[in-house]
Image (spheres, rainbow, N blue to C red):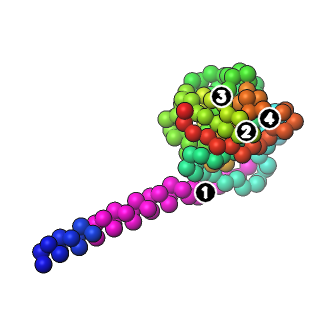
Amino acid sequence: MKNSFSSNVLLFFFLLVTILSSIEIIEAQTCGPSGQLRGQPPPDQCNQENNSECCVEGELYTTYTCSPPVGQAILTLNSFQEGGDGGGPSQCDNSYHSDDTPVVALSTGWFNNQQRCLKKINISGNGRSVVATVVDQCDSTRGCDEEHAYQPPCRNNIVDGSRAVWEALGVTEENRGELDIVWSDA
């Protein structure tokens, strides 16, 4: 009887651990909104290079502190050069980067409190691949302010790439905007 009780207790703990692990996996796969912010940009202060979206006065924008699991994402176009639509210098090294260099900004959850700073990632899309360096955060928690070039917060599934990333993937200039990609740590 004691052996049966011990087996039942072990089975119970095994099931409990399995259920709790499943919950953590499910939570990691879902990434719900963390809040909203209202657009309040000053007139004519938004840099619209690369067809960047500008905050609209009074509009509500969803914010996220998390990102979905690494894998599928949307590639967007960004300039990391001084005066470009990316705003100030890159968060990882406080520098600007040439549009001819394959660099990216990752949504807040993937940026992971600078844990991916200056690390390489593999990006696949349009039948090609490229290796790029993470230099910045595409902020999913804030936006519509000077620091973020008066653009809305980033969605939580964005890899914001330089022109060099798009060129390496073979996307012509007129077709740049958003591209479904897959990415991973290199």
The mark total stands at: 4
Foreground: disc 4 or disc 2: 2
In the rendered view, tell whether residue 176 sits above or below residue 10: above
Name the image quarter holding residue 138: top right
Question: Which label number is shown at residue 33?
Answer: 1
> Mark 2–mark 1 contact, CB under 8 Å?
no
The N terminus sits in image quarter:
bottom left
Magenta segment's dominant SS is helix
Classify residue 151 as left or right of residue 184.
Answer: right
In the rendered view, tell whether residue 178 sits above or below residue 114: below
Identified at 24% across, 67% down, the residue is: 10
Could you tell which of marks 4 and 1 lies nearer the N-terminus? 1
In the image, which residues are magenta? Answer: 12-41
Q: Report the Cα–Cα distance between label 3 and label 4.
A: 16 Å
For the residue carrying disc 1, how many other residues have a C-alpha within 10 Å: few (<14), some (14-19), or many (20+)?
some
Q: Is residue 49 magenta?
A: no
| Position in image of residue 137 (x %, y %) | 61, 36
Could you tell which of marks 3 and 4 lies nearer the N-terminus? 3
SS category of the residue bearing label 3 = strand
Foreground: disc 2 or disc 3: 2
Residue beneath disc 4: 171
SS category of the residue bearing label 2 = loop
